[in-house]
Amino acid sequence: MADKEITNTEIPGCPPGEVRGRRRTMRLLAVTGVTMFILLVIVILLGIRARERAESKLRQNTNEAAVEEVVIIHPKQNSPIDEVVLPGETQPYINSPVYARASGYLVKWYHDIGSRVKKGDLLAVLDAPELDKQLAQAQSDLDTSRANSDLAKITADRWQGLVKTRSVSKQSTDQAVDNQRASDATVNSYAANQGHYAKLVGFEKIYAPFDGIITMRNTDNGWLIAAGLNTPGQELFQIGQISTLRVFVAVPEVYSRAAHVGSKATLTLDEYPDQTFQGTVTRTSSSIDIASRTLNTEVDIDNSKGLLLPGAYVRVHLSLPAQIHSVIIPSSTLLFRSQGLQVGVVRNNVAQLVPVSIGTDYGETVQITSGLSASDDVIESPFDSLVSGTPVRITGEASGADR
């Protein structure tokens, strides 16, 4: 109606054609304004949408950056174990250093390294002139005290006879008897002193304490040998009894069942590649060492033929009561935590720390006897801060655990 009214109304002073032009211009401006408003709304909406997409992408990137990337390995299945092989070192059944109990010059030694000796064999002789003089003086003091004691006894006996006839007083007789007792005590004192120096002089000769073999000689003729509480002891010889040898073995806790007293053990050596030696587990510490998680075990071997030497490296084979299944993994997968030895595995894209037990350490690889299976995805070189529940993403698989 308004358009119609305007159409029918003529503007005074304006030709009809100019009025219609102005009307078309007004319509064009109105349409243009509406169009620009719509375009502005569309631009605003597109900006908001682009910002939302950017924020969503940023959140996604942030979440992806928070996921640790890991490389995994699969443990190598090991053949079932029915025995454990452990390193050991042979030791003499008895090994004793031989010291001098007297100070002096070494006159002569009679046995060198490798000599087989019997208990009581003379090993060396010392020259100790000071001791000889002290013994001579102690002997003289003893002889003097004995003479005084004999005289005191004669006097006491004489006075005891005279007192019966009232020729002497009872007081004098008692004094003579007491003098005799004192003289006897002095004799005992000097006798003990003489015996002390006699024993010291006896130490000038050094004897073998038991049957064995001389494994070390640390002295020579003419050396000054010092002995006593205030001087450091000098080891002259070292003697070992090697007819029976001991081998101490650190048995891992997981194999401790194999180390029971009375069980047999087989020994192998590089110098006897085609020969084995039989031993017996004679004792254990009956306690797991907290630091190494091992059981200290002693194996005794008969060496009456003398084939084995003390200090030799041996491999001790202990039979297990039942087969143990195990896997092999690289040492770089292990985590040493206060809770014990652990390994990181990936399960449902999440890291889990699994406690494991080591059977044998091969250096670059280790044998795991419990805690892992061949199907587990084990994290290679895990970072120190890894904890259970950490999201992870597998980026590759390393080649394995060959030993």
Image (spheres, grey):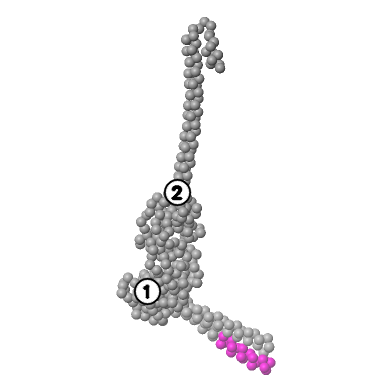
Amino acid on which the number 1 mark rests in the picture? Leu
> Picture quarter containing residue 269?
bottom left
Q: Residue sitting at 35 percent across and 61 percent down?
A: 402
**To which residue does mark 1 refer?**
267
The 10 Å Cα crowd at callout 1, few under 14, some 14 to 19, many 20 or more, is many
What secondary structure prevails in the magenta region? helix
**To which residue does mark 2 refer?**
68
Between 13 and 125, the residue placed more toward the observer is 13
Q: Are marks 1 and 2 in contact (CB under 8 Å)?
A: no
The 10 Å Cα crowd at callout 2, few under 14, some 14 to 19, many 20 or more, is some
Q: Look at the image and give the residue range highlighted in magenta.
A: 149-167
Q: Is residue 178 visible?
A: yes
Between 260 and 159, the residue placed more toward the observer is 260
Q: Residue sitting at 47 percent across and 67 percent down?
A: 253
Q: Which SS class for mark 1?
A: strand
Between circles 1 and 2, the one closer to the viewer is: 2
Between 351 and 211, the residue placed more toward the observer is 351
Q: Which SS class for mark 2?
A: strand
Task: Tell me the tag on residue 209.
Answer: none
> Picture quarter containing residue 176?
bottom right
Residue 35 location, x and y as percent? 48, 24
Label 1 and label 2: CA atoms lie apart by: 48 Å
Residue 179 location, x and y as percent? 61, 84
